[in-house]
Amino acid sequence: MFCNDDQPMFNIGVIAELLKVHPETLRIWEKHRLVEPARRNKQRLYSNNDLKRLQFIHYLINEKGLNIAGVQQIISMYPCWVTKHCSGGNKGENVNMNKPCWKEPGTYCYVIEDKSDYCSVCPHFNKKS
């Protein structure tokens, strides 16, 4: 069975329970454009990738002590934050040990040697203009 990590499936109550946060916290994070859940009949629905993004936000706030502005600054450095079908990070060579992958805990973002490497690492930069 094929699992689409971008398929909206979870309501706000389920996600809040998984993250052990109040649903209003998720609404605040959405208001600040940290995550954009899908909507169906005015109900927020989150995908597996949304959950991974929220777990990373939760980590930055609770473990690293960042505020929302700090989180916004950090995620702005992740060109793959909004990319569909991002493959995640790597544990091996060519990684940036200072930049943990938001999608796969315990892995790191690839090191980009030059801009021509963007297309081989992140589909976000593979768009045709």
Image: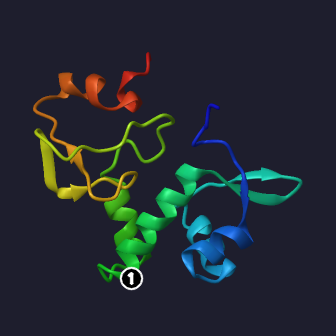
In the image, residue 18 lies at what x, y percent?
A: 59, 72
Q: Residue at x 48, y 57 (%)?
A: 52
> Given the current orientation, which residue lies at the most extreme top position?
128
Q: Residue at x 60, y 42 (%)?
A: 6
Q: Residue at x 26, y 52 (%)?
A: 107
Side (left or right) of 38 relative to 106 = right
Side (left or right) of 14 relative to 128 = right
In the image, residue 36 lies at what x, y percent?
A: 61, 55
Q: Amino acid at mark 1?
A: Asn
Q: Is residue 56 above or below residue 83?
A: below
Side (left or right) of 65 relative to 99 = right
Q: Is residue 60 above or below residue 11?
A: below
**Mark 1: few, some, or many residues within 10 Å (few <14, many ≥20)?**
few
Secondary element under disc 1, as helix, strand or loop, is helix
Q: Quadrant of residue 60?
A: bottom left
Q: Quadrant of residue 61?
A: bottom left
Q: Quadrant of residue 42?
A: bottom right
User: Total label count?
Assistant: 1
The C terminus sits in image quarter: top left
**Residue labelled with disc 1:** 62
In the image, residue 45 lies at what x, y percent?
A: 73, 56
In the image, residue 110 lies at what x, y percent?
A: 20, 41
The N terminus sits in image quarter: top right
Task: Pick the residue in front: 21 or 69.
Answer: 21
